Amino acid sequence: MSGPYRHIGAKAVDGILVLTIEVEQVKDFTISEELRYELVHAVKSRELKRIVIDLRNMSFMTSLACVAFIGVRQAMKDVHGRVILCNMTEFIHKVFSAKRLLVRSKNNGNVAFESAATLEDALAMLATTNVPDA
């Protein structure tokens, strides 16, 4: 892995921050917290409002890992940015769905995370958005 992170890769592509999860499994508190820290640090240090989290390398996670991803949403709370998850296995998609992170809230109509099948699809979705970068 390159860069300052152990568990993620981070790069900007046309004003979109692409965070790639580099670990195959997230199943304990320590890895979940380290992942959360790295994701939030990458988001705050880049100050971009359009983010893709690529899960292509991840095959397993417990619901505990959702905390790491929710940290990204919290870090972006005030900037009203968009976060798209892509390349999820069916199992990972089920974990996010079970935690209701991919469905619209009945209270406010918001969704925690959008999803796309591929990185290319996610980038295309964000390329057409009207979220100005900082």
Image: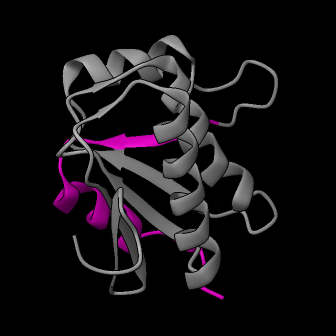
Residue 116 colored magenta? Answer: yes
- Residue ID at (43%, 19%): 62
Instruction: Please state the horizontal and vertical placement of residue 17, each as a whole percent of the image.
Output: 42, 74
Residue 102 in sight from this viewpoint: no
Given residues 42 and 98, the one toward you in this image is: 42
Q: Quadrant of the C terminus?
A: bottom right
- Residue ID at (50%, 19%): 63
Residue 19 falls left or right of residue 80: left
Q: Quadrant of the N terminus?
A: bottom left
Instruction: Please state the horizontal and vertical placement of residue 68, each as a whole percent of the image.
Output: 56, 42
Picture quarter containing residue 92? top left
Instruction: Please state the horizontal and vertical placement of residue 76, each as a whole percent of the image.
Output: 70, 61
- Residue ID at (17%, 62%): 120
Q: How many marks?
A: 0
The span picked out in magenta is 111-134
Q: With respect to residue 109, does 14 lie above or below? A: below
Instruction: Please state the horizontal and vertical placement of residue 15, each as a whole percent of the image.
Output: 42, 85
Q: Can you name the residue that lies furthest to the front here?
A: 30
Residue 82 colored magenta? Answer: no
Q: With respect to residue 126, does 44 lie above or below? A: below
- Residue ID at (61%, 34%): 67
Residue 58 falls left or right of residue 98: left
Given residues 17 and 124, the one toward you in this image is: 17
Residue 79 in sight from this viewpoint: yes
Given residues 8 and 134, the one toward you in this image is: 8
Q: Can you name the residue that lies furthest to the top here?
A: 98
Residue 95 falls left or right of residue 65: left
Picture quarter containing residue 53? bottom left
